[in-house]
Image (cartoon, grey):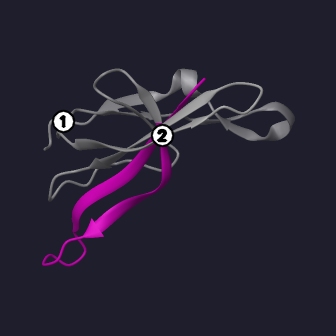
């Protein structure tokens, strides 16, 4: 089940136009996790409204028991096949049922929009 290696992309915040903060994705720091994870298909939908057709594909990532991955909602993830996705929503860190304060495993959703 845990057969894929993922790479986290974390972009620094930089000052954009008019003083707003934006992510500098061309200068994102990369970190490939040594632990293997499970990446499962979650959703796929198509939008054919003007001005263009879009395909929105989603996956759910699970870490093995005892593995807490340093992933934030603002990160992007590169899958083993080279596809880069956005982390969608908050990262779920499930509490360990026995060890107080420890993380049992991590789950989070990814999304890629094409078109």
Does 93 lie within the magenta span? Answer: yes
Does 73 lie within the magenta span? Answer: no
Residue at x 45%, y 50% (from the top left corner): 72
Image quarter of the N terminus? top left
Q: Which mark is residue 85?
A: none
Q: Nearer the viewer, mark 1 or mark 2?
A: 2
The foreground one among 37 and 59 is: 59
- Residue 78: where, in percent of width, then height? 38, 29
Outermost residue, right direction? Answer: 18
* Count of numbered tags: 2
CB under 8 Å between discs 1 and 2: no
Query: Disc 2 designates what residue?
Result: 111
- Residue 65: where, in percent of width, then height? 14, 58
Q: Which mark is residue 34?
A: 1
41 versus 30 height, above or below: below
The foreground one among 13 and 40 is: 40
50 versus 60 height, above or below: above
Q: Is residue 104 left or right of residue 77?
A: left
Image quarter of the C terminus? top right
Q: Secondary structure at mark 1?
A: loop
- Residue 46: where, in percent of width, then height? 56, 35
The foreground one among 113 and 17 is: 113
106 versus 19 height, above or below: below
Residue 102 found in image quarter = bottom left
The foreground one among 95 and 20 is: 95
Residue 17 found in image quarter = top right
Residue at x 65%, y 26% (from the top left corner): 53
Ranked by sequence position, the earlier of labels 1 and 2 is 1
Residue 114 found in image quarter = top right
Q: Secondary structure at mark 2?
A: strand
Identify the main secondary structure in magenta.
strand
């Amino acid at each position: 089940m845990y057969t894929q290696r993922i790479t986290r992309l974390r972009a620094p915040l930089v000052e954009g136009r008019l003083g707003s903060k934006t992510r500098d994705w061309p200068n994102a720091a990369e970190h490939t996790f040594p632990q293997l994870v499970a990446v499962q298909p979650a959703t796929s939908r198509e939008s054919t409204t003007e001005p263009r057709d879009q395909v929105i594909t989603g996956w759910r990532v699970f870490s093995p028991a005892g593995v807490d991955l340093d992933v934030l909602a603002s990160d992007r993830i590169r899958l083993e096949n080279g596809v880069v996705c956005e982390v969608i929503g908050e990262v779920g860190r499930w509490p360990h049922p026995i060890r107080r304060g420890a993380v049992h495993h991590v789950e989070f959703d990814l999304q890629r929009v094409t078109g």
